[in-house]
Amino acid sequence: MSDQSAALTPRHIPDRLDSPFKRALKSWETLLMTVAIAIAIANSLASPYFLDPWNLSDATFNFTEKAILALAMTFVIITGEIDLSVASIIALASTAMGAAAEAGAGTPVLFLTGLGVGLGCGLFNGVLVAKLGLPAIVATIGTMSLYRGIAYVVLGDQVYKNYPADFAVFGQGYAFWIFSIEFVTFLGLAVVAGIVLHKTIFGRQVYAVGNNALAASFSGVKVRRIKFIVFLMTGVAAGLASVMLTSRLGSTRPSIAVGWELDAVTMAVLGGVGINGGTGNILGVVIAAFVMGLVTFGLGLLNVPGIVMSIFMGLMLILVIALPLVVQRINNRRRATR
Amino acid sequence: MNTIRSLLARREALLVLACLLLLAAITARFPAFSTPKNLAGVFNDTSILIMMALGQSAVILTKSIDLSVAANVALTGMTVAMLNHLMPGLPVVVLILIALGMGMLLGAINGFLVWWLDIPAIVVTLGTMTIFRGLAFVESGGAWVNAHEMSPAFLELPRTLILGLPVLSWAGLLAILLAAVLFTRTGLGRAFYATGGNAVAAVYTGIDIGKTRFLAFVLSGTVAGLCGYLWVSRYAVAYVDVASGFELDTIAACVIGGVSTIGGVGTVGGVVLGALFLGIIKNALPVIGISPFWQMAISGAIIITAVVINARGERVKGRVILRRKELPL
């Protein structure tokens, strides 16, 4: 895999950088933006209901929770790790909230329960990966099974649905006009994530860990601590997503949010985050979230079933990574023959 | 070499001990569980897991992972079940060949993307996992193929007794034998270990690590394809969610069996024992009256425990034939 190419091919460094404008034009984000606009145009031609503001507003509900996961996943992937347990954290947090609601807890307590369970799960992942040094893929496959397994143990084939009426505000409320609380929260979190990742020392350290953990640790970056923090972040993000999703659905089953880890990883990777760590930015992920939201919404308007949409998601995940590699390969060959 | 041998023996001895303790604990309350007949039943029930875990272990040995195996089972199983329904006259042998070929093709798609484009295996198989299962939905329209729609020959084969053991169990035993020969007695097997153990050194030894990974995926896919037929035939039903989440069980069996997820370490014996350990637990749960809803949480807890134990033992590794470059962190 990358071991071979890293060992045997030198990195290509151009003699001169393109001008900033040209670079922006050729950037991944511009490409994604073009794709997003193209999809929006195609959708509006395919369905007359697409451009209705309330319809568009409804469309945001389908991806904001996943997009919040993707924001946190971005940090994890940039450090070179991965968290496959996020969807299971949603299930466990939702189950905990359901149990609390059955016990008569009010909305603030439910909200804190969701976030708290998310934090706890993130903490456990962080201990496994950062403290014990386990490979993140296997550790989070284990916790993925464990967290959802606990939800199944608690709920079995039952369902929690006795949520207080005002709990619905997180998933169904509107901040103003057509902008839902979910959507506004996502935009707010995206700005915060952008600032943290791109404008703080912590953000630089996240990149450093992903690019070269050894060099980072010699430069005084506390590699394990950074990894621990990013797993805490995904835990809390999953807790928040769980609050929103539970509030929106008004019920909890153990199978809630099955497969969402794939969507979150796809969003991050589609947004230009390199799966091997060290590269990517928040803007790309935000645009990717919109692209995926528009695709699912458009396919939904055309009555495409969810499982068929998942084929598109899988194809998109692979194609998005494969296409630049194919192009690069062709370019390399051209350069070599010249 | 002797110390490595004894460590190896200890790892597998540990698993045998764990399995025996588990059996003893269950037998103490339910003596009927440990009758030879029932144990043979447990083995038969675990055969599919053993076969697929062996396929998975080849992939993990090369420092990759195959998350698409369960979806492969669903797609291949659905395909042969539908073919059997539409063309009941088609001999089962042909259907098995189709299952093998189709599984091989699906595995080759994974392997090709990993080999030719250097895309990390986890991303490729995360994608193909949803694609394969989605295709199973597309070809079936979400409908089930039920027992009465399958031909008797199609259903009978895994149940046919040879020397007192069903064909399914013989398939499991044969897979163990073939894997043991492949992993320890062939160049390809050595290449699996070398690719995962130290990719750079493997390249300099003349091993094409991309091709080795490709072949590991082809192997894993082919086994999954065969298991697609076996699964559908054994449970006498095919639907889109067949074997949902089973990829985790195959990985769990490998990890419990001492296969290192960073590649290059693991044995056939360990994987088989890991799968049996899971199989005993799965079969014991209903016997001791624990709700099957516990199974997922228990597997999760076992995976985590096993990974922790593996990480502890990482310093004194088993079958490393080419040492990894040490990266202190």
Image: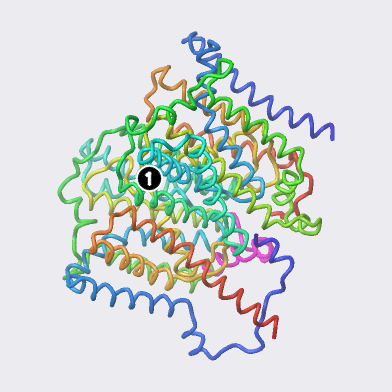
Is A23 or B163 nearer to us in this picture? B163
**Image coordinates for residue A322, horizontal then vertical, percent:** 53, 67
Please identify the residue farthest to the front as the structure is shown.
B89
Q: Quadrant of the N terminus of chain B?
A: top right
Picture colour scheme: rainbow
> SS for tag 1?
helix
**Image coordinates for residue A285, horizontal then vertical, percent:** 42, 68
Residue B17 lies in magenta, yes or no? no
Note whether residue A171 is visible: yes
**Image coordinates for residue B183, horizontal then vertical, percent:** 71, 39
Residue tagged by mark 1? A117
Residue at 49%, 57% (x, y): give it.
A230
Chain identifier of the residue bearing label 1 in the image? A
Please tell me in which quadrant of the rendered image residue A297 appears: bottom left
Note whether residue B304 is visible: no
Q: Amino acid at mark 1?
A: Val
Q: Quadrant of the C terminus of chain B?
A: bottom right
What's the magenta region? A203-224
